Image (cartoon, grey):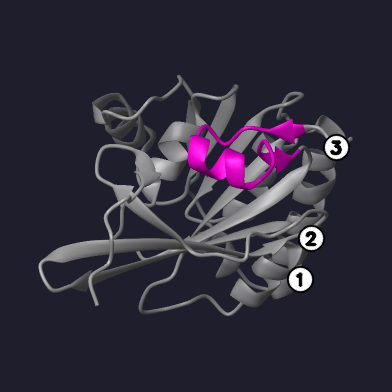
Amino acid sequence: MVNRLRTGIDVLDRKLDGGIPAGSIVALTAQPASQAELFLYELTATRGTLWLSLDRTAESVVASIEQTPANTGDPTVRHISGEAPLDNAGKLVSALPETSNLIVDPLDVLEAQEPHSRFRAFMNDLQNHIVNTGSMAILHCLDGREVPPLRDTTEHFADVVFQLRTRTTGDEVENKLAIPKFRGGRAPNDVIKLDLVEQVSIDTSRDIA
């Protein structure tokens, strides 16, 4: 039986028969103005985590993790800057230990690098290392006003795709999670309505037509 790695979010782990298969790449697509980071915060509580931040400084990420009321761990946070983010990220990925979490936040910066063949090479190396170490990679993909040209490539490489959709309806913010792709397993065919306030949980309120 394939070893499963918990996401730290009980509702998802139950839906996914215990979690994500070890050696998987997960693409989490969500709007920038959403609570998607709660998924990342709660993942850090499951096992050792390397968090690669492409936008925010390491200090900013650490502060946000410390301030969140969600259950978290103590991840190693590295800020990837400079003119060669793919090379710098690749070096850190290659040192990822066995059965670990890797968070890339956001992946958009790497998807925008040229030539495009270098991004594909990075994703192939990432996939090989995640499989060899029995780890899990979560790629935070911003689904905003500008979507990188290589987003299709990312979702093709990904073993699992989480699509978080956030919208304001009437006087409430509504969050729904779909899992359209689950390579090597069974993808849930229902959309999950989530409550993303202090942690990730199911929204049990009943919709009124």
User: Which image quarter is the C terminus in?
Assistant: bottom left
Residue type at mark 3 is Val
Check whether the beta carbons of the residues at disc 1 and disc 2 lie within 8 A of each other.
Answer: yes
Lateral position of residue 74 relative to residue 23, left or right: left
Q: Quadrant of residue 182?
A: bottom right
- The residue pinned by badge 3 equals 2
Q: Which mark is residue 35?
A: none
Q: Looking at numbered disc 2 in the image, what kind of residue is underneath it?
A: Ala
State which region is magenta: 4-21
The N terminus is located in which quarter? top right
> What residue sits 71% from the left and 30% below the top?
96
Residue hosting label 2: 121
**Residue at label 1?**
117
The answer for how far apart the CA atoms under marks 1 and 2 are is 6 Å
Is residue 152 shown left or right of residue 140? right
Q: Position of residue 100 (x, y in %)?
A: 67, 28
Name the foreground residue: 175 vs 119. 175
| Viewer can see residue 9 | no
Taking depth in this image into account, of 48 and 86 the one nearest to the observer is 48
Q: Is residue 8 magenta?
A: yes
